[in-house]
Amino acid sequence: MPQPNTLLTNTRSDRVKSVRALSRRSVRDRTGRFLVEGPQSVREVVRHHPELVVDLYLTPDAAERYVEVVTAASAAGLYVHEVTDEVLAAMSETPTPQGLAAVCRTPVATLDDVLVGSPRLLVLLTNVRDPGNAGTVIRGADAAGADAVLVSDASVDVLSPKVVRSTAGSLFHLPVVTGLRVDATITRLRDAGIRVLAADGAGTVLLPDVDLVPSHAWVMGNEAWGLEEEVRAQCDEVVRVPIYGAAESLNLAMAATVCVYASAAAQRG
């Protein structure tokens, strides 16, 4: 059972540089590795997918504060390395890392895997570019009990440090399928008997008027310009979240959360 190694103190070591390099997408793509930072996300990957963890790094203070994470990591046979605060800061792009980080293998999830499970609730992100929005949508989908989140090839990399942090561990609770072509994905969903609902401010159907009991997928567009016309045309319905107050609109993450919770309420009675 691997135990914490000698305290790592050299901020300029090759190990530190290789971990820091994972902030770049080209390195993540080449190595098949990505960085998970912070106690919540590290706890969830150790708990739910320890097979993804290559190395776990933590400060002595974090080792005392998060004993349950260290215990679970040791029970899973993971490699645990104690590091100084300075080394962890050099590994991370976060100005104030919270004492824990893990280098993980890229999870593999496919649309075929998702469809085999007869999903009832899916979310498809088409051109979502903001890391915080993408992560929050994944977190909201997880909280609402969605079966998976599907991400287009034109969207932000969900394994970037900012997205991973903003999911707060939800990245490890449900399948997140990436690199998808939007038109082909919508066709696959409809062929599988899944209704495709576009969430867009241009919708003529209001959210409370939509039948959300049958299996369906919410399609979410870009933060600035919403869904492209050709994407809306592929969907079964274009749905608008009603605005009852004076707010001009909801941002992407808020609208997505409202939609998936409406779906969860309808499907769960």
Image: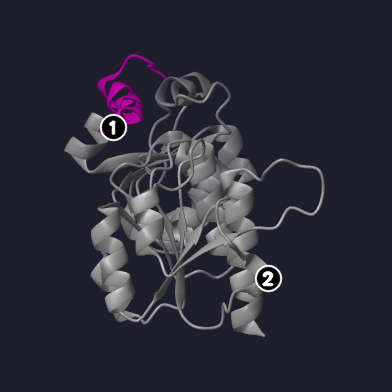
Which numbered dot is residue 208? Answer: 2
Real-space CA distance between mark 1 and mark 2, rounded to the nearest whole angstrom: 40 Å
Is 121 part of what is drawn in magenta? Answer: no
- Mark in front: 1 vs 2: 2
Q: Residue at x 39, y 47 (%)?
A: 228
Establish if 177 lies above or below 102: below
Given contact means CB atoms under 8 Å apart, are the residues at marks 1 and 2 in contact? Answer: no
Quadrant of the frame with the N terminus: bottom left
Which numbered dot is residue 25? Answer: 1
Establish if 141 lies above or below 162: below
Mark 1 Cα within 10 Å, few/some/many (few <14, many 20+)? some
Q: Residue at x 26, y 36 (%)?
A: 28
Q: Position of residue 48 (x, y in %)?
A: 45, 63
Q: Quadrant of residue 32?
A: top left
Which residues are the magenta region?
9-25
The one nearer the camera, 50 or 139, is 139
Q: Position of residue 49 (x, y in %)?
A: 39, 60
Q: In the orientation shown, which residue stands out farthest toward the top? A: 12
Number of numbered discs overlaid on the protein picture = 2
Which numbered dot is residue 249? Answer: none
Establish if 208 lies above or below 193: above
Establish if 58 lies above or below 209: above
